[in-house]
Amino acid sequence: MKYPKSISRVKLINKPDIVTVIENEGIALTQRGNALWAICPFHAETRPSFNVSIEKQVFYCFGCQVGGDAIKFIMALKGYSYLQALRYLAIGKKNNSETVKNAISRDRELIKLFRQWEKKKHIELTDNLHAMMNMKKQIVSLEDMEKLAWIFDEIQRIEYRLDILFDGDDEQKFNLFKEIIKYDV
């Protein structure tokens, strides 16, 4: 369907106010005449070259030549795709606030479950490590060493996993989770 030229995309997706979006991202705007100005968040500068038109609902930086609407601003600032920016701004769904609240609630629940798994796995691995160390102390003969040689590999594997759980970042911990689920189930 072709739209008349007077209907712009802005009117079709009900974008948030650009000033609110920019200020919510921590950028201080100063009014000069009919426009708002700020230090550009996209490049280093000492004098404001970042211009926001309230009437047109667009921004433009005269220093780095980046410009656009609220969606393009979020895309440039956060490195998001168009769809990610829409989600970030909660645009495009009829029950935006309810959908966003549900997504946030689900994400929080997944994080909570992951943290519970992390604590449980840490306790389990620590207990296993103590048991392995006790078994290692009971090795007194070459025959015992041959029967229990697997303990040395297991101790290293457990220590490696504990190091990740204790000092690793969330990505490393999640990769460990996937590895454990894949091999330990």
Image: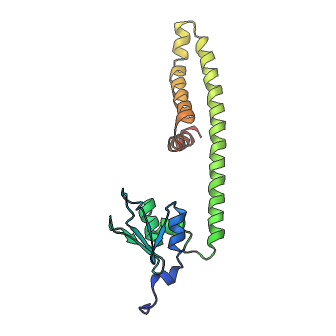
Q: At which x and y percent is residue 101?
A: 65, 64
Name the image quarter holding residue 129: top right
Out of 90 and 132, give the one closest to the viewer: 90
Coordinates of residue 156 in the picture (x, y in percent): 51, 25
Left or right of 76 in this view: 163: right
- What kind of colouring is applied to the model shown? rainbow
State the residue in front, 47 or 164. Answer: 47
Q: Residue furthest bottom?
A: 4
| Name of the residue lying farthest toward the top | 141
Q: Which residue is drawn at 48% across and 67% down?
A: 30
Location of residue 53 by image quarter: bottom left
Q: Which quadrant holds the N terminus?
A: bottom left
Q: State which quadrant residue 6 falls in.
A: bottom left
Residue in view at x 63 percent, y 60 percent: 104
The residue positioned 57% from the left and 69% from the top of the image is 90
Tell me the residue at 48%/71% (across/down). 31
Kindly give the residue lying farthest to the front in the view shown. 33
Q: In this view, does 166 lie to the left or right of 82?
A: right
In the figure, 109 relative to 86: above or below?
Answer: above
Q: In this view, does 168 lie above or below 57?
A: above
Q: Would residue 64 be found to the left or right of residue 184 on screen?
A: left
Where does the image place residue 128, in percent across and percent down from the top left? Answer: 63, 26
Q: Number of numbered discs present? A: 0
User: Residue 20: percent from the left, percent from the top?
Assistant: 54, 69
